[in-house]
Image (cartoon, helix red, strand yellow):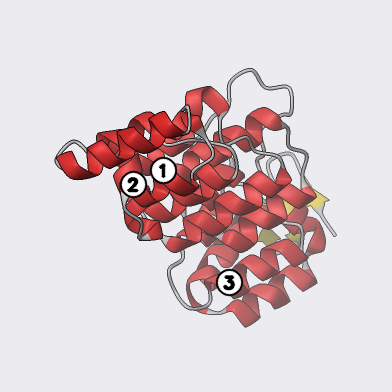
C-alpha cells in the first residue's frame, strides 16, 4: 500500500519510493531471491518504478541476468516504449532499444509481444539490431522482429547495410532470405563466405536478379570464373 504526504510517496511508514528503488538496485547487483521477495511484498511500488530501472537490469552481466529479466516480466515492471504514433523514435532511452543494445532476447520478445508496436517501431528495431557488433544472438532477435512484422527492406535496405558494416554474414543471410538483397560486393563476399559458396555456384542457384551485380563484383579477380558467369547469364537471358 502507498502512503502520501506533501513531500514524498511512502510504501510503508518508514520507507519512501526512493528508498525502495535503492533497494531494488542493490538486489539487482547481489541477490535475485531478495529482489523477487521485495517485488512480491510491494506490488504497488513496482508499478511506480521508473522505466530507467530496466537499463540497470539489462546492464547486468552476471549469470543471474536472465533470472532478473524473468522477475521484471513476471511483475510487469514499467517500460518506456515509443508511442505507436510517434513521428520520431528515440533509439537511446526506450526499453526495446535498450534490450536490443544489451542483446536480451527474452526482453525483446516480451516487449514486442506484450506492448503495442507498429511498422516504424519494428523496422527501427531491426535496423538497430543489425548495427550491433557481430554476435549470433543478433540473428535470433532479428528473426523475432521480422516474424512480428519488421521489413528487411525498410529505409533502402538499411538493415543489411548495417550488417555488412559489422561483417555479419549470418545476419546478411537471414535478411536476404527474408526479402532484402546483396547490396554491394562486400555484402556479397560476406554472404558467400557464410554459405560457403563460390560466386559462380551461387549464380546458378540464385533466383533474385537484384543480387547479380554484387555477385559479379566478387569475380573481378578471376577471368575464368568471370567468363563462365557471363556465359551462364547470357545463356539464361539474365
In the image, residue 21 sits, relative to residue 29, either above or below, namely above
Q: Residue at x 36, y 56 (%)?
A: 197
User: The residue tagged with tag 3: helix, strand or loop?
Assistant: helix
Does residue 1 appear to the left or right of 65 in the view shown? right
- Write down the residue under mark 1: 203
Cα separation, mark 3 vs mark 2, equals 44 Å
Res. 66 mark: 3
All told, the count of numbered labels is: 3
In the image, residue 52 sits, relative to residue 36, either above or below, namely above
Assess whether mark 2 and mark 1 are in contact (beta carbons under 8 angstroms).
Answer: yes
Residue 50 in view (yes/no): no
Q: Could you say which quadrant of the image residue 13 lies in?
A: bottom right
* Quadrant of the drawing holding the N terminus: bottom right
Q: Nearer the viewer, residue 122 or 212?
A: 212
Q: Nearer the viewer, residue 117 or 178?
A: 178
Residue 165 point in image, percent of width and height:
31, 40
Amino acid at each position: 500500500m502507498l502512503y502520501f504526504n506533501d513531500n514524498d510517496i511512502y510504501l510503508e511508514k518508514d520507507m519512501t519510493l526512493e528508498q525502495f528503488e535503492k533497494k531494488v538496485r542493490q538486489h539487482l547487483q547481489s541477490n535475485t531471491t531478495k529482489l523477487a521477495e521485495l517485488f512480491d511484498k510491494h506490488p504497488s511500488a513496482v508499478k511506480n518504478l521508473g522505466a530507467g530501472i530496466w537499463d540497470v537490469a539489462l546492464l547486468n552481466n552476471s549469470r543471474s541476468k536472465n533470472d532478473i529479466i524473468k522477475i521484471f516480466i513476471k511483475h510487469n515492471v514499467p517500460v518506456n516504449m515509443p508511442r505507436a504514433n510517434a513521428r520520431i523514435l528515440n533509439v537511446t532511452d526506450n526499453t526495446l532499444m535498450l534490450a536490443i543494445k544489451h542483446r536480451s532476447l527474452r526482453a525483446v520478445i516480451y516487449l514486442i509481444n506484450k506492448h503495442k508496436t507498429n511498422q516504424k517501431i519494428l523496422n527501427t528495431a531491426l535496423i538497430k539490431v543489425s548495427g550491433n557488433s557481430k554476435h549470433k544472438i543478433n540473428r535470433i532477435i532479428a528473426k523475432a522482429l521480422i516474424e512480428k512484422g519488421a521489413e528487411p527492406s525498410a529505409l533502402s535496405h538499411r538493415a543489411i547495410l548495417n550488417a555488412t558494416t559489422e561483417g555479419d554474414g549470418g545476419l546478411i543471410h537471414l535478411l536476404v532470405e527474408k526479402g532484402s538483397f546483396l547490396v554491394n560486393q562486400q555484402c556479397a563476399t560476406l554472404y558467400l563466405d557464410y554459405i560457403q559458396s563460390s560466386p559462380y555456384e551461387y549464380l546458378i542457384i540464385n533466383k533474385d536478379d537484384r543480387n547479380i551485380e554484387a555477385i559479379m563484383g566478387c569475380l573481378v579477380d578471376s577471368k575464368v570464373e568471370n567468363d563462365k558467369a557471363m556465359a551462364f547469364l547470357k545463356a539464361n537471358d539474365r
